[in-house]
Image (cartoon, rainbow, N blue to C red):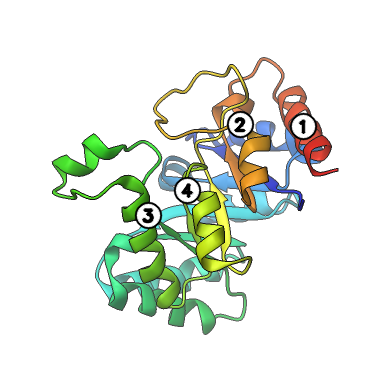
């Protein structure tokens, strides 16, 4: 079994606190996931500052706009040298293709990952949006669209990983939020699994935030998750 990489989600506006957390867990995680809260408060220069610590960056901007606007945003983000960048599959084929072309043209292209269905949503939430098919079917439809448009991988809940691997094989990067250690609080996540369960299903990247960042000992929490994954992969 291949070992999944853990990216710690740093979803906070305080730059100094973010850097302190990143330094404390550096030896126990594979990278940092920076989301909208951090990026809106601090901007691209602070992305580069955290990247200078030596950890790869997963820039989770969930881009969703007209094709030209998204292409421009992808070009700007690519210049930062981040490893992963997210877009919404729901933006449609033209937007996804524009994003893929913009990334490919960059000297430092990130891997583009398409959001399928947010892990905070379940089928009752989809119904409110006018989507009547089950979550798993919606995820598969968004995956088909994204991968067929040149996107490198997908963001999905751990519940959909196994089905996506069966359908698309080992090539797409599968990044999985909604990871909670056994006994951990779910927070606003509705479709969750433990780190080792998600790894066993075929996830490449595990995005883990509050179980690490809100722990009394973030480094210890990150180390415990890393040890769990190592044992499961052995």
Residue 59 position in % (x across, y down): 52, 54
Q: Is residue 44 left or right of residue 233?
A: left
Quadrant in the rendering for residue 228: top right
Name the residue rendered at 57%, 28% in the picture.
180
Along the line of sight, the residue nearer the viewer: 34 or 181:
181
Q: Label 1 near label 2: C-beta < 8 Å?
A: yes
Q: Which mark, by number, is residue 139?
A: 3
Identity of the residue drawn at 63% across and 52% down: 202
Question: Of callouts 2 and 4, which one flags the residue occurring earlier in the amino acid sequence?
Answer: 4
Q: Are marks 3 and 2 in contact (CB under 8 Å)?
A: no
Mark number for residue 194? Answer: 2
Whether residue 196 is visible: yes
Position in image of residue 64 (x %, y %): 30, 61
Residue located beneath label 4 in the image: 160
Query: Gap in Å between the C-alphas at discs 3 and 2?
Result: 20 Å
Percent of width and height locating residue 169:
59, 66
Q: Is residue 65 above or below residue 218?
A: below
Q: Secondary structure at mark 4?
A: loop
- Classify residue 212 by image quadrant: top right
Which residue is rendered at x = 39% and y = 68% of the image? Answer: 144
Of mark 1 and mark 4, the one earlier in the sequence is 4
Q: Residues within 10 Å of mark 2 (few under 14, many from 20)?
A: some
């Amino acid at each position: 079994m291949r070992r999944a990489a853990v990216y710690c989600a740093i979803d906070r506006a305080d730059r100094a606190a973010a850097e302190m957390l990143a330094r404390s867990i550096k030896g126990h995680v594979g990278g940092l996931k920076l989301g909208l809260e951090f990026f809106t408060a601090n901007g691209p220069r602070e992305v580069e500052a955290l990247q200078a610590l030596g950890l790869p960056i997963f820039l989770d901007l969930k881009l969703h706009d007209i094709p030209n606007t998204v292409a421009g945003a992808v070009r700007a983000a690519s210049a930062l040298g981040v490893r992963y960048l997210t877009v919404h599959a729901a933006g449609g084929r033209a937007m996804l293709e524009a994003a893929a072309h913009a990334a490919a043209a960059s000297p430092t292209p990130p891997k583009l990952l398409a959001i399928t269905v947010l892990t905070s949503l379940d089928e009752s939430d989809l119904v409110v949006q006018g989507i009547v098919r089950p979550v798993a079917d919606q995820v598969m439809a968004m995956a088909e669209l994204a991968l067929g448009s040149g996107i490198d991988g997908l963001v999905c809940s751990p519940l959909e990983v196994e089905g996506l691997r069966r359908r698309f094989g080992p090539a797409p990067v599968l990044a999985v939020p909604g990871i909670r250690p056994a006994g951990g609080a779910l927070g606003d996540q509705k479709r969750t699994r433990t780190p080792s369960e998600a790894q066993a299903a075929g996830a490449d990247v595990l995005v883990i935030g509050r179980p690490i960042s809100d722990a009394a000992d973030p480094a210890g929490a990150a180390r415990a998750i890393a040890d769990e994954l190592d044992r499961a992969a052995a």
